[in-house]
Image: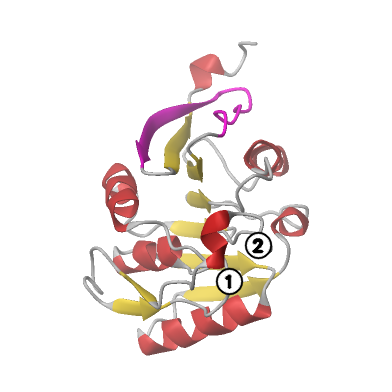
Amino acid sequence: MARFPGARRARTKTAPPGNFRIIGGEWRSRRVPVPALEGVRPTPDRVRETAFNWLMPVITGARCLDLYAGSGALGLEALSRGAAEVVFVDRSPAVLQQLRENLRRLDCDRARTVCMDAGSYVEGPATRFDIVFLDPPYRQAALAPVVARLVERGWVGPTTAIYLEHEVKAPLPPMPAGWRLARSAAAGQVRYHLARFEPQTAGQT
């Protein structure tokens, strides 16, 4: 999950949580350590439960991208629920080191980690994913441009599901042509969505 930059947000002044709980699947109720870094924030249990209820029809065997990995809560939840593979991308070596330790602890070999800025990663050679998780740092307006590049460069296609998460006060992220927010919800300070492609809207402006 995303990390808050520096101490710009009041919540980052408190100590990060020590762990989070995987909600369902193979590792249900397992507690996983969170990187001991200021600002790392796992997606809350309630939000993950709803999001993966939305994704239930497509999660088994899915190839997933967790583009702002942070704690890895979304990607690990996907693996627990039967995803075939998750690629975790984060620019922090310490975050990825903890993720690799967590994957070893869970005896999971269906994931790999990439130490890179999300914007740089999506400019690289594209391979298609079935599910993309986007939970970028708050207050950076990153969702709209990164979704646009994922679509333009072919990381996602007509059958891909894109999960988006942002602070509740932020405006809804605009979607590229043909894409719409199929599901939306809010919990506490979090607003989250599932975006899908609808061919009949692709030519509309």
Q: Which residue, given by chain and number where applicable, does mark 2 sit on?
A: 7
- What residue is drawn where x is 23% and y is 66%? 25
Which element carries disc 2, helix, strand or loop? loop
Q: Position of residue 54 (x, y in %)?
A: 31, 42
Which corner quadrant holds the C terminus?
top right
* Residue 197: image location, x then y, percent: 50, 30
Q: Is residue 178 magenta?
A: yes
* Foreground disc of the pair 2, 1: 2
Does residue 83 show up? no
Crowdedness near tag 1: few (<14), some (14–19) or many (≥20) residues, C-alpha within 10 Å: some
Q: Earlier in the sequence, mark 2 or mark 1?
A: 2
Instruction: Tell me, for residue 4, which label it has, or none.
Output: none
| Relative depth, front residue between 110 and 17 | 17
The residue lying at 67 percent from left, 79 percent from top is 93
Look at 57% across and 76% down and name the residue there.
37
Left or right of 3 on screen, residue 164: left
Q: Are marks 2 and 1 in contact (CB under 8 Å)?
A: yes
Residue 74 visible from this viewpoint:
yes
The residue under the point 37% across, 61% down is 78
- The magenta segment: 170-187
From what the image shows, is residue 157 above or below residue 138? above
Name the amino acid, label 2. Ala
In the depicted structure, whether residue 74 falls above or below residue 108:
above
Classify mark 1: helix, strand or loop: loop
Q: Nearer the viewer, residue 191 or 176?
A: 191
Label 1: which residue?
38
The span from disc 2 to disc 1 (Cα, nearest Å) is: 8 Å
